[in-house]
Amino acid sequence: MTVAHRTEALTAPSLTAAVVALRTRGMRVSSTRRALLHALFRAPQPLTADELAGGLDLASVYRNLDALESVGLVRHVHVGHGPGLYALARRRDTGYAACERCGRHVALAPEELDGVRATVLAATGFDTDFSHFPILGTCPDCAAEHREEHHAHP
C-alpha cells in the first residue's frame, strides 16, 4: 500500500524549474524522471502510473513517482477502487469527489472544501484535506439513472 508523503508541496511552474528543484535537493534527474515530469506537466488531470509510463518500465515509474512524491513535487490520490492517480503538487492541494458507481471524479479547489473541512473538524477533531482520499458519493448522472431505475421498477 502506498503511503501519502506529508512533505510540504514543492511547486514548480515549469519542467525546468522542477529539474532545478530536484538537483538543488541532490537528486539525479534520470531520463525516467524527466519523462515523468514532462508527462505530468502536459497532463490536464491526474494520471495513473500506467498512463504516465508511456513504454517505460513500470517498476521504475513507481519508484520514481515515490521519489518525486517524497520531496513534495508530486501527489497521488485514490479515487475509488482503481489505481492511484498522480499529479504535480500545488501550494494547497486540490481535493476530489469520486462516484462510487461509475468511477468519475472531479477536482475541487481547496476553497470549495473549506466548509466541509470545518464541519469535519468541529464534529470529529480531525483536520482533513480530501487530497489523498476523495469525498465518495454518487455523481449527478448515476443518481439520475438510479432514480429512473427505481421509478421504472417500483
Image (cartoon, grey):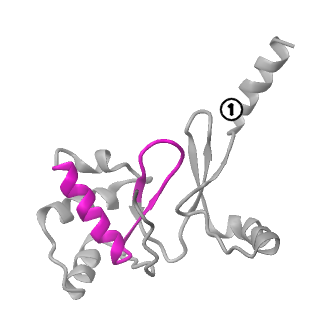
Q: In this view, does 32 lie above or below 6?
A: above
Q: Which residue is drawn at 77% across and 68% down?
A: 115
Q: In this view, does 104 lie above or below 96?
A: above
Tell me: 31 left or right of 120: left
**x and y percentages locating residue 87 in the rendered image:** 41, 60
Q: Which residue is drawn at 42% across and 53% down?
A: 85
- Outermost residue toward the top? 153
**x and y percentages locating residue 38 in the rendered image:** 25, 60
What are the residue bounds of the magenta stretch? 57-86
Q: In this view, does 20 lie above or below 136?
A: below
Tell me: 5 left or right of 132: left
- Outermost residue toward the front? 1
Quadrant in the rendering for residue 133 = bottom right
Of residues 120 and 105, the one drawn nearer to the viewer in this rendering: 120
Q: Can residue 47 be seen in this view?
A: yes
Of residues 133 and 36, the one drawn nearer to the viewer in this rendering: 133
Q: Name the residue under label 1.
A: 141
Q: In which quarter of the image is the C terminus?
A: top right
Question: In terms of secondary structure, where does tag 1 sit?
Answer: helix
